[in-house]
Image: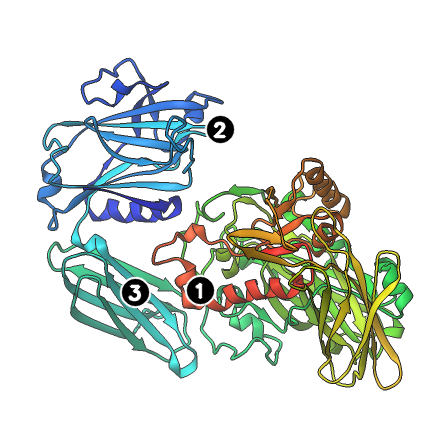
Amino acid sequence: MVIFKKMLCGFFCTMLCTSLVAQKNLSFPTAQFKTGDHSSWKEKDFDDRDWKQIKTGISWEECGYPDYNGFGWYRMHFDLPVSLVEKSYWKDKLVLNLSVIDDVDEVYLNGKLIGKTGSFPEDAVGFVSKFLDERIYEISAKDPVWLWGKENVLAVRVYDASGQGGICKAVPVLYITDLIDSLYVNSRLEGIDSERKYIVSLKNSASGLQRGKVQAQIEDVETGKVIKSFSESVQVKPNGEFSKAISYTTGRKLKAQVIYTDDFTGKTKKDEIITPYIQLPSPLQPQIALSQTSIGERVPWQDPKVNGINREPMRSSFFVYPDAPSAVVGDLEHNPLYRSLNGIWKFNWVKDRDMRPTDFYKVDYNDTNWATMPIPGNWELNGYGNPVYVNVGYAWRNIFSNNPPLTPSEDNHVGSYRREMEIPSDWNGKAIYLHFGAVSSNLHVWVNGHEVGYSEDSKLESEFDITPYVKPGKNLIAFQVHRWCDGSYLEDQDFWRLTGVARSVYVYARNLKHLKDIKITPNLDVSYTNGTLTVATEVTPGIQTIALSLTDAEGKEVANATLTGNRSGILKVGKPHQWSAETPYLYRLTATVKDDANEVEVLSLKVGFRKSEMKNKQFTVNGKPVLIKGVNRHEINSDKGYYLTREDMVRDIQLMKELNINAVRTCHYPNDPLFYDLCDEYGIYVLDEANLETHGMRYAEKCLAKNPLFLDAHLERTSRMVFRDFNHPSVVLWS
């Protein structure tokens, strides 16, 4: 029986390294190769001596076939020693791992088809690429196709449609599985204070009983002393699991290790954790009382439970103004409640994390010899480090093995920023917030020497209440950014990996009594004729009313309401103009916020009446079927990196409209809020995607979606995106 498992290429590297140690393998670093296609090339006795010998594991373009697209054949000759199966206890099956093949393949062993991935142009369904799938073919050790003690021939037929082609990611390998290969050994550290535990687990996916010995221990790294340990003989039934926890209390830097030894063969499997820092109690919630060293001791960049410290809750995107006329005009640069911090900052860059300055945030720190860095700006496009392109896998793959939540210190560049800013005297007595639009990969902030907070998620904004730390006049803002943090495990998108500040940085002021958030839900009745606009608000204590006015594109008021009490209400509009990609009609909702007698602030938002649904397996907008003609779009510019101007965004959208494209996927992360405003205005359907991509960890047991330590991070990144972008009529789908 032949079984094909679809896996992705990152897991292969880990599996291959393990199996090479555990048992004898056959690898195929070279092969006979020929372009073209002929059915006789699969046969064992075909004479391929005049074919060219090339390397495997790299594309055929790199082997002397530049720009070649089409069919190519690999033929690999090998002797299959009987000792391979004799030394195995399980003697069950052989596994052929061809890694990743671009785009489609058929695999023949001694002339017999043993597997196929994708679809060739001549197939009934037409060409279907499977270039991301790892080719793992399993064949029973008893299958007569094997010629034990004799020469065997492996022939691989490949079709590539574009770009690189061939067996292009790793050298193919053939090995025989043993019982222990179906045992997954895992361990983790959990808990805080006196509840700390080292948990060891074994999972058996084989059809046979696993029998062996488990030895686990926790060791103090500095002294080498074993703190806790256990040794136990175990039996794990088919599809069964063994789990045991060791409790411990020390906060020292630790090494935790579990080793399983198979009774049948003596082969071993192990898992090891080395904490990079002294473990201290974790906060019970993100909002904490800060001391001068509290964040630093907690090392949040290695703790997946800490995604933000003292970061403001996410809200919808809006700016407030002193009065309605200025709110409607929306001239942000002349808004007296706003100050941009874009421009040149003092900057220090170090190659390795352990070399970073630790007192740079102090007011009297001498930064005279520091360089400068523009904000927005990526380091790699300003002379610091190199851009790295990776599809599947992490940018540290050549220096560090995946071990979430840990990241390397070597080549983990750290950038430190300093700048003075002016706080106007008329902001005295107001709440003042510091906004970072997008920072890769994390953000650690100080103001006037005081530690303010921390944030992860490089594609959503972070805001901090800095009111207690600032004064009228000059103030020092300092922050530090790491190239990689634990959150980087969630950001394994296939694009250029860059570091730094990608969007605007600014401060803004609010009245102490103000509107915290506003949620707008448009709807159409069952006949898609009349509309309602449900408005829900969240305010600080002291706000009495919110006056709502809805005007059409000509400025004529079509509905109004005053919110009191629970501060939510419904505006009804008869036969509203409907928003769609073809007719992106926008109304303006102006909200005037009042305390007992005075106007506190005013905000103005564009809204659209749009109802998107799935009806009879058809995506509809305003009751009409819509054919999605969409594209994937990254935020990338050859000169500015991740930073895109309004002109860049408009140019992209206009090009989409010219090409009859009606939808865009924000692959693979939330975009700049301005982009959604423009999609509202021009008429583009948006599939809004959270900043979550972990395919470098594969989809088996080590998948981070299965790791409870990363649960909060998954939920926060998704929910914060929805909270921010909910009000946009262009957003019709979430990813």
In front of the other: 609 or 507: 609
| Amino acid bearing label 2 | Ser
Q: Quadrant of residue 131?
A: top left
Q: Check contact, mark 3 vs mark 2: CB within 8 A.
A: no
Left or right: 70, with 488 as reference point: left
Q: Earlier in the sequence, mark 1 or mark 3?
A: 3
Q: Which mark is residue 452?
A: none
Q: CA distance from mark 1 to mark 3?
A: 15 Å
Report helix, strand or loop for mark 3. Answer: strand
Q: Quadrant of residue 32?
A: top left
Crowding near the residue tagged with mark 3, few <14, some 14–19, many ≥20 C-alpha atoms within 10 Å: many
Question: Which residue carries the number 3 mark?
Answer: 257
Extreme top residue here? 50
Question: Number of labelled discs?
Answer: 3
Q: Earlier in the sequence, mark 2 or mark 1?
A: 2
> Whole-percent x and y of residue 400?
42, 51
In front of the other: 320 or 77: 320
Report helix, strand or loop for mark 2. Answer: loop
Question: Which residue carries the number 1 mark?
Answer: 276
Extreme front residue here? 527
Q: Earlier in the sequence, mark 3 or mark 2?
A: 2
Q: Nearer the viewer, mark 3 or mark 2?
A: 2
| Amino acid bearing label 3 | Gln
> Whole-percent x and y of residue 180?
19, 55
- Residue 409 shows up from this direction: yes
Question: Which residue carries the number 2 mark?
Answer: 162
Q: CA distance from mark 2 to mark 1?
A: 44 Å
Q: Quadrant of residue 342?
A: bottom right
Q: Quadrant of the N terminus?
A: top left
> Whole-percent x and y of residue 510?
80, 73
> Whole-percent x and y of residue 524?
68, 63
Residue at (74%, 51%) from the top-left corner? 584
